C-alpha cells in the first residue's frame, strides 16, 4: 500500500513537471512569435502557430493561437485562411461559453469583411460580437469591448459617408471607455476615439470642431500608458490637415514634419501612406517640386510594400501547403495504424475463437457482420440564372445624362472607384448602371473607367507641356492607375501606341 502511494506521488510530480515545462514553452514561443516574428519572419511565425496549437493545453490557449494566426494571415491579405482560423477559434469559444473571446473573434471577422467591402456579412458578425459582449461577466472588460465595437460601427458609417452617425457611435464608445477603471488604459482608447471623431468632423468641413478633438486626442495620448504609440503620428497629421485647410501653411508644415518623423521611426506603413498622401495635397498647393517628390516617394512606398507582401505571401502559401501535406501524411499514418490494429484484433479474435472451439468443442457462433454503408456524394451544379435588365428609354436616357454630368467631375481619377460607389453617387441600381454602360459604351465598367483615364491624360499631355516632362509612373498615379504596367498596357490598348511613343511624338511636333 505504501509503495502504491509513493508511485502515485512520483507520477503526480512527473506529470506536473511535464505540464509546467509545456506551459513555459508555450508562453515563450507565443511571446516571441507575437512580438518579434509576426512582422520580421512571417513564415517562421506561421510554422510556430501550428506548433503552438499542437502543444496547447486547453481551449483558451488554442483560441489565443488561432487569433494570432488570423492576425498574421490578414496582415498578408490571405482573407480566407484568416477566416478559417477565426471560425476554428469561434467554435472553441462557443463550446466553452467564453463570451469575452466570442466578442473578440466576431469583431475581428467584422473588420476583415469590412476591409474587403463585404459590408452585409461584416455587419452580421458585428451584431454577433455586440451580443456576445453583453454577456461578459467582468463589467470592465464588457465596457472595453463595447467601446471598441462602437469604433467598428463608426467605420461602417464612415465608408457610407454617414459622418454624423459615425461621430455619434464614437461618442457612445467614449462614454463606455470612461466607465472602465484604472486597470484599462482608457486614456489611450479615448485618444483613439477622439482622433477618429476629429477625422469625421474634418470630412464634414467642421474645421474648428476637428481641431478641438485632435488637441484632445494629443493630450489624452500623452497621459496614457502608450504615449509613444504611432497614434501620435496620426494626430499630428490630422492637425496638419486642419491648419492646411485654414491656410495656415506654416503650422501645417510643422505638424506634417512631426508626423513624418514618427512614421519613418516606427516604419508603420499605414501611417507613412497617410502622411505622404497629406503632404502630396499640401505641396500641390505650395511647392510643385515637392509635390512631385512626395508622389514618387508614395509610389515607391506602395511598390516596396507590394513587393515585400508578395514575397511574404508566397512563402506563407508555400508553408500552408507543406502543413497540408504534413497533415495528410499524418492522417494517412493514423489510418494505417487503425487498419493494422483492426487486423490485429481480428486475428486475435479469430485465434481465440478457434482455440475455444477446439477446447470446448462447442457449436460455432454466428457472427453478424457490420453492414458497410457507402455514401455517394452527388455533385449538384446550381442552375445558372441569366439576368437581363429591362428599362424604359426615358430611364436609360436619364441614367446616361447622369453619367455625362459625373464625367465632368473627373471621378474616374480616384484609384478606389467601384461600380457600387458610382451607383450610390448617382442613386441608381448597380445592375442598371452596368447595363447602360455595356449597351451604350460597348464596354464593361472597368474598361469604361480606364478609357476615361487614358483620354484624360492624353488631353493633359496635348494641352499642358509640363506634363511631357513627367515620369510615366507619375502619369499613371495621376490618372488613377494602381501600377505603371497596368497604365502602359491600357494606354497602348486605347491609343494604339505606348505612353513614351505618344510623348515623343508630341515633343517632336513642338
Image (cartoon, helix red, strand yellow):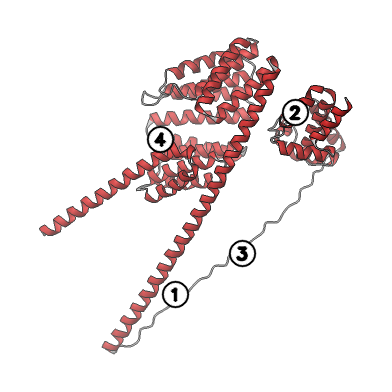
Q: Are marks 1 and 4 in contact (CB under 8 Å)?
A: no
- Looking at the image, the residue that sits furthest to the left is 2
Q: Say which of 388 and 115 sits in front.
A: 115
Percent from the top left, x then y, of residue 31?
39, 38
**Residue at 77 percent of width and 35 percent of height:** 449
Closer to the observer: label 4 or label 2? 2
Residue to which mark 2 is pinned: 411
Residue 441 position in % (x across, y down): 84, 39
**Helix, strand or loop under label 3:** loop
Q: Residue 233: percent from the left, percent from the top? A: 53, 22
- Residue at 35%, 41% in the rendered image: 27
Tell me, for residue 370, which label it has, or none. Answer: 1
Q: Which residue is mark 3?
A: 378
Q: Quadrant of residue 377?
A: bottom right
Q: Residues within 10 Å of mark 4 (few under 14, many from 20)?
A: many
Mark nearer the N terminus (3 vs 1)? 1
Which numbered mark, 3 or 4, is in the foreground of this view? 3
How far from the left and from the top, in percent, is residue 510? 88, 24
The outermost residue toward the bottom is 361
Q: Quadrant of residue 382?
A: bottom right
Mark 2 / mark 1, whichever is N-terminal: 1
Secondary structure beneath label 4? loop
Sooner in the amino-acid sequence: mark 2 or mark 3: 3
Amino acid at each position: 500500500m505504501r509503495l502504491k502511494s509513493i508511485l502515485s506521488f512520483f507520477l503526480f510530480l512527473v506529470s506536473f513537471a511535464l505540464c509546467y515545462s509545456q506551459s513555459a514553452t508555450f508562453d515563450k514561443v507565443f511571446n516571441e512569435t507575437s512580438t518579434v516574428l509576426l512582422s520580421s519572419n512571417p513564415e517562421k511565425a506561421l510554422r510556430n502557430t501550428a506548433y503552438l496549437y499542437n502543444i496547447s493545453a486547453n481551449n483558451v490557449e488554442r483560441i489565443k493561437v488561432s487569433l494570432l494566426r488570423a492576425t498574421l494571415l490578414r496582415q498578408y491579405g490571405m482573407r480566407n485562411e484568416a477566416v478559417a482560423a477565426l471560425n476554428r477559434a469561434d467554435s472553441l469559444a462557443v463550446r466553452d461559453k467564453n463570451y469575452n473571446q466570442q466578442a473578440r473573434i466576431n469583431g475581428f471577422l467584422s473588420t476583415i469583411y469590412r476591409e474587403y467591402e463585404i459590408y452585409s456579412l461584416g455587419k452580421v458578425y458585428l451584431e454577433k460580437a455586440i451580443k456576445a459582449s453583453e454577456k461578459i461577466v467582468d463589467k470592465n472588460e464588457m465596457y472595453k469591448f463595447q467601446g471598441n465595437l462602437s469604433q467598428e460601427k463608426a467605420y461602417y458609417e464612415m465608408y457610407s459617408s454617414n459622418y454624423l452617425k459615425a461621430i455619434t457611435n464614437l461618442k457612445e464608445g467614449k462614454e463606455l471607455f470612461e466607465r472602465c477603471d484604472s486597470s484599462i488604459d482608457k486614456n489611450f482608447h479615448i485618444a483613439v476615439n477622439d482622433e477618429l471623431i476629429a477625422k469625421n468632423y474634418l470630412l464634414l468641413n467642421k474645421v474648428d470642431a476637428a481641431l478641438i478633438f485632435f488637441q484632445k486626442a494629443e493630450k489624452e495620448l500623452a497621459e496614457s500608458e502608450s504615449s509613444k504609440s504611432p497614434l501620435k503620428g496620426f494626430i499630428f497629421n490630422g492637425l496638419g490637415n486642419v491648419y492646411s485647410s485654414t491656410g495656415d501653411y506654416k503650422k501645417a508644415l510643422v505638424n506634417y514634419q512631426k508626423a513624418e518623423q514618427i512614421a519613418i521611426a516606427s516604419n508603420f506603413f499605414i501611417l507613412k501612406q497617410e502622411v505622404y498622401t497629406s503632404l502630396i495635397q499640401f505641396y500641390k498647393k505650395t511647392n510643385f517640386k515637392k509635390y512631385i517628390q512626395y508622389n514618387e516617394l508614395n509610389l515607391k512606398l506602395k511598390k516596396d510594400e507590394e513587393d515585400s507582401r508578395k514575397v511574404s505571401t508566397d512563402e506563407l502559401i508555400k508553408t500552408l501547403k507543406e502543413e497540408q501535406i504534413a497533415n495528410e501524411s499524418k492522417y494517412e499514418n493514423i489510418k494505417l495504424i487503425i487498419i493494422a490494429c483492426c487486423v490485429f484484433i481480428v486475428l486475435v479474435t479469430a485465434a481465440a475463437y478457434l482455440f475455444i472451439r477446439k477446447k470446448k468443442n462447442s457449436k460455432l457462433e454466428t457472427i453478424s457482420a457490420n453492414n458497410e454503408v457507402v455514401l455517394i456524394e452527388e455533385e449538384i451544379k446550381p442552375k445558372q440564372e441569366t439576368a437581363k435588365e429591362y428599362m424604359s428609354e426615358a430611364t436609360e436616357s436619364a441614367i446616361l445624362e447622369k453619367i455625362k454630368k459625373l464625367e465632368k467631375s473627373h471621378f474616374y481619377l480616384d484609384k478606389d472607384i467601384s461600380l457600387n460607389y458610382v451607383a450610390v453617387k448617382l442613386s441608381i441600381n448597380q445592375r442598371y448602371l452596368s447595363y447602360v454602360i455595356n449597351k451604350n459604351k460597348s464596354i464593361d465598367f472597368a474598361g469604361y473607367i480606364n478609357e476615361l483615364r487614358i483620354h484624360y491624360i492624353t488631353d493633359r499631355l496635348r494641352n499642358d507641356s509640363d506634363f511631357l516632362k513627367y515620369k510615366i509612373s507619375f502619369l499613371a498615379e495621376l490618372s488613377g492607375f494602381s501600377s505603371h504596367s497596368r497604365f502602359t498596357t491600357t494606354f497602348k490598348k486605347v491609343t494604339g501606341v505606348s505612353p513614351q511613343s505618344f510623348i515623343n511624338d508630341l515633343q517632336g511636333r513642338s
